[in-house]
Image (spheres, rainbow, N blue to C red):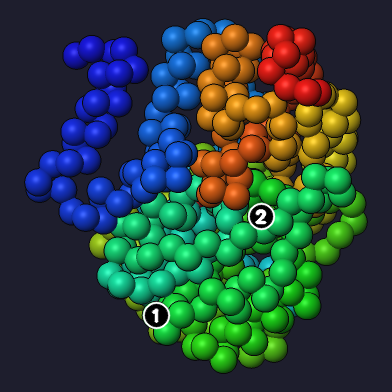
Amino acid sequence: MSHDWESIERRIRESASSSWLTEGMKGSLLLDYEDRGLMSPVIASHKLHHLADRAGGVVSLSAGSQIGRMPPEVAVRATHDALEAGYVGFPSSLGYREFRQAIARKLRRENGIAAGPDSEIIPTVGAQAVLDGTIRILVDKGDDVLLIDPEYASIEPLVAMAGGRVIRVPLRYDRKAQAWSFDPDEVGRRVTPRTKLFIMSNGNNPAGLLYTREQLAAIGDLARRHDFFILSDEEYERLVFDGQTHTSMAALTGMMERTITAMSFSKAYVMTGFRIGFMVAPAAIVDHMAQIVRFAVQAAPSLSQRAAMAVLDSDVSAWLAGSLRELESKRDYGLGRLRGLPGVTCASPSGCYFLFPHFDLGMSSQALAEYLITEGKVSTLPGHMFGPTGEGHLRVSFCVPQAQLAEGLDRLEAAVRRLTVGGRTSG
Ligand SMILES: Cc1ncc(COP(=O)(O)O)c(C=O)c1O
């Protein structure tokens, strides 16, 4: 089998045109981005991995999970204890009852959500499984799904697999103010008679935007008026900077009954590999999610449920505060470095550990990301992977050790300066 990029790409495209492949799977490759002159985000991801493997010695600023940190000690201990106590069989598809009860207490305490542990909460394989399950439960062929743009890159392929049509709701980036903003009227203007679901991550990955209570209430009003559900992906709800507050959609009056909330232990507690998260939703949705959990994966992992329960039952606030301080300091460092570059502006993220700088260098995000890997030996993600509005941006992780961040930004800076000196931008 040949391993040059052209043959890999040919294989991806050939397999996408197989007569036996479902339309949903074909759609999930997002080849329609090519109609806008953008590379399919899925092919882009394959290509960047390929280039990084070939280049060797690439410093990664493209990570999606915290590198170089461990979960809180209590989670590590609980994992060992659970193993020794024999938690090695199938848990129920509904998860351990004590865990669901601990989640219900957390939701009341931290989020102001009143959810019944035996009917409105179910542990899942990360928040990712909530996204997948919700879309499978709610979206039929021909349904419209309103999706924030830019948005977490896994969502659009999932909607495509279900046969839904994505209608993008753009966030706005103001280069002068170096800030992202959101106008709920943009949602209202795009509602159709087939709108079934509105999907958002709060804080937004990749832009780091946190939504205000007023903005959430305005979306909620639209959902009630036009009768659609809301999938609120709250993966980053505990990673909120500058003392800001995160508001959960389901905490707003009357919104629990039409909101599906995805939460996780992956990001705040450095437990990505544990694959543990949960869905909070009306009982009828949770019932269907239990079917999906049962038939797709049997149950969320037993050891991970015990570890996550230990986190919820302990006071990890000092640990989390330390984590946030460290991330804030890396964010500010990265922001300073990027804002100092010619042709670059960058918003300060409030609610996730990525920077999403805009590059005015006269080249596409994809071309820039490829150039940075091959010539600069540093990997980032091109912004269009998160939706067309992300074009012009790169996603840069700051959830890596400080030395890695500094080295990656040194390389990025040197490569960008070579471009600007070469006359490819006005600076
Ligand atoms: C916004 C968002 N939602 C969901 C996920 C899924 O994470 P997990 O399944 O580990 O909870 C991620 C992971 O990067 C994410 O960034």
How many numbered marks, from 0 up?
Answer: 2
Q: Quadrant of the N terminus?
A: top left
Q: CA distance from mark 2 to mark 1?
A: 25 Å
Residue 248 position, x and y percent, is 69, 71
Tell me whether the residue at label 2 lies in contact with that at label 1, contact meaning CB atoms closer than 8 angstroms: no
- Specify which label sits upstream in the sequence, 2 or 1: 1
Residue 380 position, x and y percent, is 61, 28
Name the image quarter holding residue 394: top right
Residue 122 visible here:
no
Q: Is residue 83 above or below residue 247?
A: above
Left-right relation of 54 to 380: left
* Disc 2 within 8 angstroms of ligand 1 (CB): yes
Q: Nearer the viewer, residue 94 or 47?
A: 47
Task: Identify the element where label 1 is drawn.
Answer: loop
Residue 204 shows which numbered tag? 2
* Crowd tier of the residue under label 2, counting other residues whose Cα lies within 10 Å: few below 14, some 14–19, many 20 or above: many
Residue 175 position, x and y percent, is 80, 45
Left-right relation of 63 to 145: right
Left-right relation of 83 to 372: left
Residue 269 position, x and y percent, is 67, 46
Residue position marked by numbered label 1 in the rendering: 194
Q: Quadrant of the C terminus?
A: top right
Q: Is residue 82 above or below residue 196?
A: above
Residue 229 shows which numbered tag? none
* Dot 1 amino acid type: Arg
Residue for point 67% across, 58% down: 171
* Dot 2 amino acid type: Asn
Q: Nearer the viewer, residue 150 or 73?
A: 150
Residue for point 35% across, 66% down: 164
